[in-house]
Amino acid sequence: MNDRTVDNNKLSSFEQYESSSNKDEINLIELVCIMLNSYKLVLFITCIFVFFGIGTMFFSQKNWVSSAIVSLPSERQLQSLDSANNSLLLLNIDTNISQDDVFDKFRKYYASPDLFSKYSETLKVKPVGSVSVTRLIADKNANDYFENRNNYIFSYSSSFDFGMKSTLSDYIKYVNKKVNNDINYQIENILDNSKKIANEEYQFALQQAENEQMVKIQRLEYATLIAKAAGLKKPINNDFDIYDRSLNYPISLGSDALDKQLEIEKAITDLTIINAELLNKKLYLDKINSLQPIIVDIDAFDYLQSPSEPIQQDVKKRLLMIIIFSFIGFVSSITFILIRHYIRGRQSILLKLPRE
C-alpha cells in the first residue's frame, strides 16, 4: 500500500513538472498577443529612443561641403601667356610653360594645407575646415573616363556652413593669383638667365675677336719690319710671295702698303664693324636687354561648375543613426515587456502554490 502511495506521488510530481515545462515553452500566438496588448508601451519606448537618436544627430558635429568642378584652362584664358611665349621665341627663348603645367601647378597649390593656412591668416574670420582635390571620374574603366580625365572636383569641407561658398570662391582666386605670381617669377628668371648667357657669349666672342686683331696687328708689324729690311716698298709678285704666305707675313705687299694696313687695323676700335658674327651677337644682346618686364595675367583653370552652396555630406549616416536607435528602442521595449510578463507569471504561480 505504501509503495503505491509513493508511486502515485512520483507520478503526480512528474505531471506537475511536465505541466510546468509546457508552460515555459514559447507560444508565438501568445507572444503576439502580449505585444499587441502592450503596443502603447512599445511605441512609447521606441519613440523615446528615436527622439534620443534625433537629439544625438542634432547636437553632433555636422560635415558641410561646398565644391566646384574645374578643368584645363582654354586658349582664350592663356592668351597673355601665349603672347609672351611667342615674343620670346623670336629671340630663341623658350619658357617651357604649357597648358598642363599651369593646371598641374594650380591643382597642387589648391590641395596644399600650408597654402590654405596662409590664406586663412589673411582673413579677419579664420575659416575652419580643409580642402581636397578629386577626379570627377576616378574609375579608369568607366566609359567616359577619357573624356573627363582632366576634370576635377575642388572641395571645401567644414563643420560650419556659413560663408562656405564665398570662402571656396575666394580661395580659388587666391590660388590663381599664386600661380600667376609663380609664372611671372619663372619668366623673369628665364629672362635674367638668357640675358646673362647672351652677355657672356658676346663677351667671349669679343675677346676672341680682340685676340685675332691683336695677332693680326703683330703679324703686320713683323711683316713691315721684314719688308723694310728687305728694301721692299712696293708690292711684288715673285718667290717672296710664296714665302710670306707660308709664314702668314704678307711682306710682298711692300712696306708702304703694310704701314697703311697696320694704321687701319690699329684705328679700328669697334670690332663689330668688321666681324659679322660679333655684330649679330651684339644685336641679340641689345634686343634681349631691351625687353620690358613681362607680366602675364591668366586663369589657370576653367569652371565647369562654379562653387556650390554647402550641402551636408553625412546625411545618410545620420538617417542610419536614427534607424539604429529605432531598432534598439523596439528591441528594448519587447525585451522589457517579455521580462515583465515572465516575472508576473512567476509571481502568480508562486501565489497559487499551497502553503506548507
Image (spheres, grey):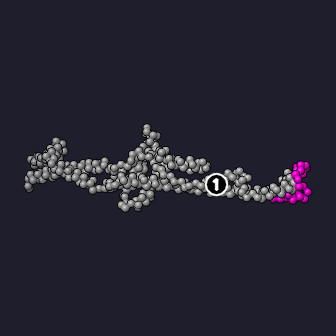
Which residue is rendered at x = 45% and y = 48% of the image?
301
Which residue is rendered at x = 22% and y = 52% of the image?
51
Q: Which residues are magenta?
A: 217-244
In front: 149, or 103?
A: 103
Q: Quadrant of residue 60?
A: bottom left
Are there few (<14), some (14-19), or many (20+) residues within 10 Å of tag 1?
many
Which residue is rendered at x = 37% and y = 60% of the image?
126
Q: Is residue 60 above or below residue 19?
A: below
In front: 128, or 290?
A: 290
Residue 224 colored magenta?
yes
Residue 346 colored magenta?
no
- Tell me if I can see residue 334 in this picture: yes
Asked whether, in this view, residue 135 is left or right of residue 293, the answer is left
Q: How many marks?
A: 1
Q: Look at label 1 and name its amino acid.
A: Leu
Which residue is rendered at x = 47% and y = 51% of the image?
106
Q: Give the percent coordinates (x, y) of residue 69.
A: 40, 46
In front: 325, or 109?
A: 109
Q: Is residue 243 above or below residue 140?
A: below
Q: Give the percent coordinates (x, y) of residue 34.
A: 15, 46
Residue occupied by mark 1: 285
In front: 119, or 299?
A: 299
Asked whether, in this view, residue 191 is left or right of residue 260, the answer is left
The C terminus - image quarter = bottom left
**Regarding mark 1 in the picture, which secondary structure is present there?**
helix
Q: Give the percent coordinates (x, y) of residue 80.
A: 50, 49
- Tell me if I can see residue 217 in this picture: no
Q: Main secondary structure of the magenta part?
A: helix
Q: Give the percent coordinates (x, y) of residue 111.
A: 44, 53
Q: Residue furthest top?
A: 143
